[in-house]
Image (cartoon, rainbow, N blue to C red):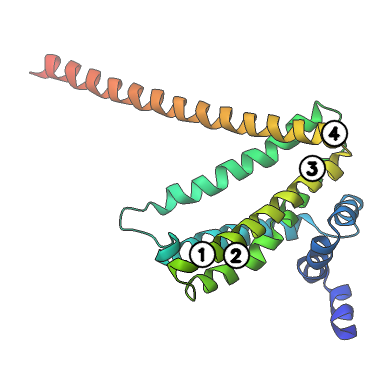
């Protein structure tokens, strides 16, 4: 343990990805405080955690037993599945910061970005274990899988709640308001992108038809 501690002192990134994660999961309130003060965590470590969390989601989705809805079919679109995971998450992080910036939030974007990444630590650690367990359970034991899934995702949600509250030094009411407004922001942003995409596709289709009509009348 002492040797590992000395190694962590020499390699801050290793410390941020091991000891700091363990501390954050055991003491989330103090963990957020130390992230804000720069004692624990880093933007580099947070970026790695985001990438790892995404990889865990994609891989475990494919490797989970088909009994519990895992696996990819021939019709699955990996890019679409990737976007479904990335876009809402990114909008939530950005939206939470933007909402807090107009609602007396104390956290900076760097702090919010880092705190959210550490909130995913439990998911990163436990979800692969749950994926392995899914192959040892039968359909009659689905309640075990569902209970463990609920506990993992539930505690991750609790960590996010604590992260928002402590990062911005909010009370309970302001924290709930921030989360609800952030979800509203994310939904509106996604709907706006979908509408713009549909309009753009229609515009391209109309332009193509117009071009074909003009070419037919001019050159025929």
Q: CA distance from mark 1 to mark 3?
A: 27 Å
> Along the polypeptide, which appears first: circle 1 or circle 3?
1
Residue at numbered disc 4: 105
> Along the polypeptide, which appears first: circle 3 or circle 2?
2
Residue at numbered disc 2: 127
Q: CA distance from mark 4 to mark 1?
A: 35 Å
Residue 12 falls in image quadrant: bottom right
Determine contact: label 3, label 2, CB under 8 Å. no
Q: Is residue 51 left or right of residue 19?
A: left
Q: CA distance from mark 4 to mark 2?
A: 32 Å
> Along the polypeptide, which appears first: circle 4 or circle 2?
4
Q: Is residue 1 left or right of residue 80?
A: right
For label 4, count other residues whose C-alpha is less than 10 Å away and answer few (under 14), some (14-19) or many (20+).
Answer: many
Q: Is residue 110 among what the camera can see? A: no
> Along the polypeptide, which appears first: circle 4 or circle 1?
1
The quadrant of the rendering that contains the C terminus is top left
Residue at numbered disc 1: 60
Q: CA distance from mark 2 to mark 1?
A: 7 Å
> Along the polypeptide, which appears first: circle 3 or circle 4?
4
Q: Is residue 121 left or right of residue 57?
A: right
Residue 3, percent from left and from top:
87, 85
Mark in the foreground, 3 or 4: 3
Residue 199, percent from left and from top:
40, 23
Residue at numbered disc 3: 164
């Amino acid at each position: 343990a002492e040797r590992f501690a000395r190694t962590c002192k020499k390699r801050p990134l290793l410390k941020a990805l091991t000891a700091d994660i363990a501390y954050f999961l055991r003491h989330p309130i103090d963990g957020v405080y130390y992230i804000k003060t720069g004692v624990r965590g880093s933007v580099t470590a947070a970026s790695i955690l985001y990438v790892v969390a995404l990889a865990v989601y994609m891989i475990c989705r494919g490797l989970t037993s088909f009994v519990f809805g895992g696996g990819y079919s021939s019709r699955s679109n990996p890019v679409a599945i990737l976007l479904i995971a990335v876009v809402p998450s990114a909008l939530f992080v950005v939206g939470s910061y933007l909402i807090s910036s107009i609602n007396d939030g104390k956290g900076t974007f760097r702090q919010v970005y880092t705190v959210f990444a550490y909130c995913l630590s439990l998911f990163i650690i436990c979800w692969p274990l749950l994926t392995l367990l899914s192959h040892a359970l039968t359909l009659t034991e689905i309640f075990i899988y569902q209970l463990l899934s609920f506990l993992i995702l539930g505690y991750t949600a609790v960590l996010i709640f604590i992260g928002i509250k402590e990062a911005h030094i909010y009370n309970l009411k302001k924290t709930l308001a921030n989360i609800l407004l952030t979800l509203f922001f994310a939904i509106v942003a996604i709907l706006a992108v979908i509408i713009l995409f549909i309009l753009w596709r229609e515009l391209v289709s109309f332009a193509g038809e117009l071009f074909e009509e003009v070419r037919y009348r001019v050159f025929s």
